[in-house]
Image (cartoon, rainbow, N blue to C red):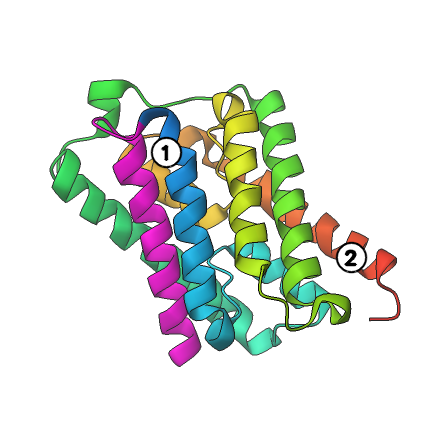
Amino acid sequence: MKKYLVEFIGTFFLVFTIGMTVLAPGAGAMAPLAIGSVLAVMIFAGGHISGGHFNPAVTLGVWLRGKCEGRDVVPYMFAQTAAASAASLAVKALKTGFLANAAAMTGAMTPEAGPALLAEFLFTFALVWVVLNVATAKGTNGNSFYGLAIGFTVLAGAYAVGHISGAVFNPAVAVGVCTMGIIAWNSLWVYLAANFAGGIVAALAFKFTNSDD
């Protein structure tokens, strides 16, 4: 239960920070820095308890890599998604009100499916690849930089492809930003497909390149 609570807390503050910095009045061009930073600090805070996934695609990749017990996969994903939903409601309470939708003020993003699928796949792959190599590999065991490496991957991805896909890289975040009205619900499938595919391919690539681990 402690692991699931840590996953809830970390995912909550990730999604809460996304909403508060993206929805006007937000942090503008500084939003990715805040988002990458909160992910890094939450990983440092909870990584020793739960692994600091805060992302169903990461949980899937870590499970395929063999560093997450099968019995934890569904509870982790449930905790992450529940946290994203709760964070979205907190953002709405502070920004738009529970009944209002951000889309009414800013217009929900509806990305072009092809480019968004590619952008989300590539940076979710990068994110899970980095997680597996800095947080689960024998060669980097005990390092002190894993949280920064993971946070900066999200930061880089947000600046690189945020204008294409919204830089979600996380199925739980996708549910959260759709709930807040930042991204249209009819685009949710793009993120689920690309993010989970990125996590799977990253795990396979890790196992191929670290066959002795």
Position of residue 190 in the picture relative to residue 17 (left or right): right
7 inside magenta stretch: yes
Q: Main secondary structure of the magenta part?
A: helix
Q: Quadrant of the C terminus?
A: bottom right
* Above/below status of 163 relative to 68: above
Tell me residue 101's x, y (percent): 20, 30
Tell me residue 158's x, y (percent): 50, 33
Tell me residue 128's x, y (percent): 64, 52
- State which region is magenta: 1-27
Q: Pick whichever of labels 2 and 1 is earlier in the sequence.
A: 1
Place residue 182 in its image quadrant: top left
* Front in this rendered view, residue 157 or 204: 157
Disc 1 crowd rating (10 Å Cα; few below 14, some 14-19, many 20+) is many
Give the amino acid at mark 1.
Answer: Ala
Q: Which residue is mark 1?
A: 31
* Front in this rendered view, residue 143 or 192: 143
